[in-house]
Amino acid sequence: MKHLIVYAHPNPESLNHSILDTTVNALKKNGHKVTVRDLYELNFQPVLKPEDTEAMKAGKTPNDIKTEQEFISEADAITFIYPIWWTGLPAILKGYVDRVFAYGFAYMPGAEGIVKLLKGK
C-alpha cells in the first residue's frame, strides 16, 4: 500500500515529529511504501492567490499544486500529522488544503450534489 503522510510542524524536536517517526516506522515495518510531505521543509506556499484560481479555471494548475496533487493521486491512504493550535490546524496546512484539494481535483458539482473525486483515500 502506498501511504502519503502530510506533516505540518516546524520543530523537528516536537512531539508531532515523534509521532511522525513512529508512524513511518510502523507503516514500513508492515510493508507499506511511505512518502512524507513535510510542509515546512518544503517551504510550501500556503496563500491562495487570485492568479492560482484563474489558472486552475483555465486548466493550468500551478506546478506546486500539481506536484502535491500527484502525490495524493498516487497514494492509497493519506494521513495528516499536525498540532492543534488555537483549536485549529496550522496555517500552512490550512493553505495546503485550500490550494491542493481544489475544485476539479477533490470535488466537482454533479446532478445530485457534490461529486467526491478522492473516494477511497
Image (cartoon, rainbow, N blue to C red):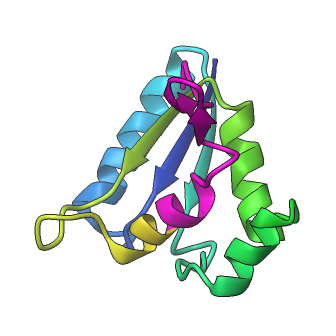
Q: Residue at x 58, y 40 (%)?
A: 107
Question: In the displayed structure, would residue 60 be above or below residue 40?
Answer: above
Q: Nearer the viewer, residue 93 or 19?
A: 93
Determine whether, in the image, residue 22 is placed left or right of residue 3. left
Q: Nearer the viewer, residue 48 or 44?
A: 48
Q: To which quarter of the image does residue 117 belong? A: top right
Q: Residue at x 71, y 44 (%)?
A: 71
What is the span of residues highlighted in magenta in the rendered image?
96-121
Task: Examine the structure image and report whether residue 46 is included in the region drawn in magenta.
Answer: no
Q: To which quarter of the image does residue 13 belong? A: bottom left
Residue 120: % across, % down: 54, 18
Question: In the displayed structure, would residue 49 be above or below residue 116?
Answer: below
Q: Residue at x 31, y 46 (%)?
A: 19
Question: In the displayed structure, would residue 42 be above or below residue 61?
Answer: below
Determine whether, in the image, residue 1 is placed left or right of residue 46. right
Residue 74: % across, % down: 74, 32
Q: To which quarter of the image does residue 34 belong? A: top right
- Quadrant position of the N terminus in the picture: top right
Q: Residue at x 69, y 55 (%)?
A: 68
Task: Examine the structure image and report whether residue 118 is included in the region drawn in magenta.
Answer: yes
Residue 46: % across, % down: 53, 77
Residue 39: % across, % down: 54, 67
- Quadrant position of the C terminus in the picture: top right
